[in-house]
Image (cartoon, rainbow, N blue to C red):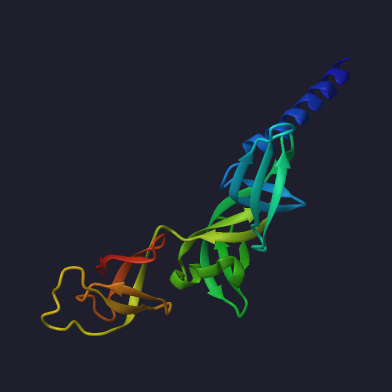
Amino acid sequence: MGGRLTAKKTLILNQYLQETYMYESSDLRKGLKIEMDNDPFVVVDFQFKKPGKGQSLYKCKLKNMITGAQFEKTFRSGDKFNKADLEEQEMEYLYAEPESYCFMNTTTYVQEFLSKEQVGDAVDLLVENTVCTVLFFGERAIGLTLPNFVNLRVTKSEPWAKGDTATGSTKPATLETGFEIQVPPFVDEGQMVKIDTRTREYVERVSE
């Protein structure tokens, strides 16, 4: 009796967990992350259509979070699909190889590699020892997010011309990563500056 009761409870628990990690078509929205064909996808565009007769239609543009490929897919009312098994970990950027970038979990010291495609334009503001948020699908690293702000050194900038005090005036400056931004005229070559990684713009000078 006890064994049968335990088995029944286990079955109910498994069903509950399966439902907990499932989405229905009515859950679809822009930014939702789902799993299909063993890959993670994010909804980048979404339209709901209600025909005069028949089931509701959910037209989505999906982006593969591993390959970057995009395509359109239409779901019908009642369709179900899995939540993407995603997890974020804080990892420190160590070094670059010809086709990849190495990151280390600062707690476990486990190292993971991301491809150039997965790192994307984050490389413009990425320097060694930067602690980033690395996104995992299952046990596979698939992308990263930079901290909101990073401090980088200006390696090239024209000297401040006397009299150039107009409000809003800026000049180009090259950072240690090779990325070029606009800075105020008083920022000199060799100085550290704070950059907002979300806007990729200068915030302020940083004292050393």
Q: Nearer the viewer, residue 39 or 95?
A: 39
Q: Position of residue 49 (x, y in %)?
A: 64, 39
Please determine whether, in this image, residue 3 is positioned above or below residue 75: above
Q: Quadrant of the N terminus?
A: top right
Q: Quarter-wise, where is residue 54 in the image?
A: top right
Please determine whether, in this image, residue 185 is positioned above or below residue 207: below
Q: Position of residue 184 (x, y in %)?
A: 23, 72
Q: Nearer the viewer, residue 24 or 120?
A: 24
Q: Nearer the viewer, residue 154 or 29?
A: 29
Residue 127 in view, yes or no: no
The residue shown at (54%, 74%) is 95
Q: Residue furthest top?
A: 1
Please determine whether, in this image, residue 35 is positioned above or below residue 157: above
Q: Residue furthest front?
A: 52
Q: Position of residue 87 (x, y in %)?
A: 60, 49
The residue shown at (60%, 78%) is 97
Q: Position of residue 9 (x, y in %)?
A: 79, 22
Q: Quadrant of the C terminus?
A: bottom left
Q: Quarter-wise, where is residue 152 in the image?
A: bottom left
The residue shown at (74%, 37%) is 79
In this image, 119 relative to 52: left or right?
left
In this image, 161 relative to 101: left or right?
left
In this image, 95 relative to 52: left or right?
left
Residue 207 in view, yes or no: yes
